Image (tube, rainbow, N blue to C red):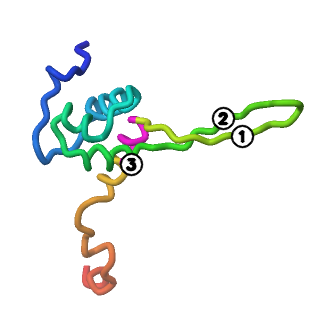
């Protein structure tokens, strides 16, 4: 299996992000790079990176027990799986609504 690197990752302009690109975003963000730096590395606009980070950010919960009490702390991380799932869900609902779903007159004539 070939792992995606900067050299073998080919991007086309105005295209949707792939799963490999989302993995690269997660890796680069965990290394502390800015959205603009990640965008330069992947060859996409920094706003695309920002949109993807917002789409794939999930809330994590950490529980800590101290002196018989349980404390819960929440924090947010980017998950490429969540980003991909959100993209697929939005893509599934995209497109024009068909007339026969909403028109009662059309259903009566059919």
**Badge 2: residue crowd in 10 Å (few <14, some 14–19, many ≥20):** few
Q: Residue 5 sits in which quadrant?
A: top left
Tell me: residue 12, above or below residue 106.
above
Nearest to the observer: residue 61 or residue 18:
61
| Residue 49 point in image, percent of width and height | 29, 43
Q: Which mark is residue 55?
A: 3
Q: Which mark is residue 22?
A: none
Task: Give how far apart the Cα atoms at labels 2 and 3 are.
Answer: 22 Å
Q: Which mark is residue 72?
A: 1
* Mark 1, secondary structure of its residue: strand
Task: Give how far apart the Cα atoms at labels 3 and 1 are.
Answer: 24 Å
Magenta stretch in the rendered image: 80-86
**Badge 1: residue crowd in 10 Å (few <14, some 14–19, many ≥20):** few
Count the marks. 3
Where is the N terminus found, in terms of image quarters? top left
Q: Earlier in the sequence, mark 3 or mark 1?
A: 3
Task: Give how far apart the Cα atoms at labels 1 and 2 are.
Answer: 6 Å
Q: Are marks 1 and 2 in contact (CB under 8 Å)?
A: yes
**Is residue 23 shown left or right of residue 75?**
left
| Residue 94 point in image, percent of width and height | 28, 59
Question: Is residue 84 inside the magenta stretch?
Answer: yes
Q: Are marks 3 and 1 in contact (CB under 8 Å)?
A: no
**Is residue 36 shown left or right of residue 63?**
left
Where is the C terminus found, in terms of image quarters? bottom left
| Residue 12 point in image, percent of width and height | 10, 39
Q: Which mark is residue 62?
A: 2
């Amino acid at each position: 299996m070939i792992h995606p690197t900067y050299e073998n990752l080919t991007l086309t302009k105005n295209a949707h992000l792939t799963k490999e690109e989302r993995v690269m975003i997660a890796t680069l963000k965990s290394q502390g790079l800015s959205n603009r730096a990640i965008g330069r590395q992947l060859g996409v606009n920094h706003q695309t990176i920002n949109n993807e980070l917002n789409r794939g950010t999930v809330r994590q919960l950490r529980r800590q027990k101290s002196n018989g009490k349980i404390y819960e702390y929440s924090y947010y991380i980017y998950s490429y799986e969540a980003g991909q799932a959100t993209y697929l869900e939005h893509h599934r609902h995209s497109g024009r609504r068909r007339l026969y779903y909403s028109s009662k007159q059309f259903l009566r004539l059919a």
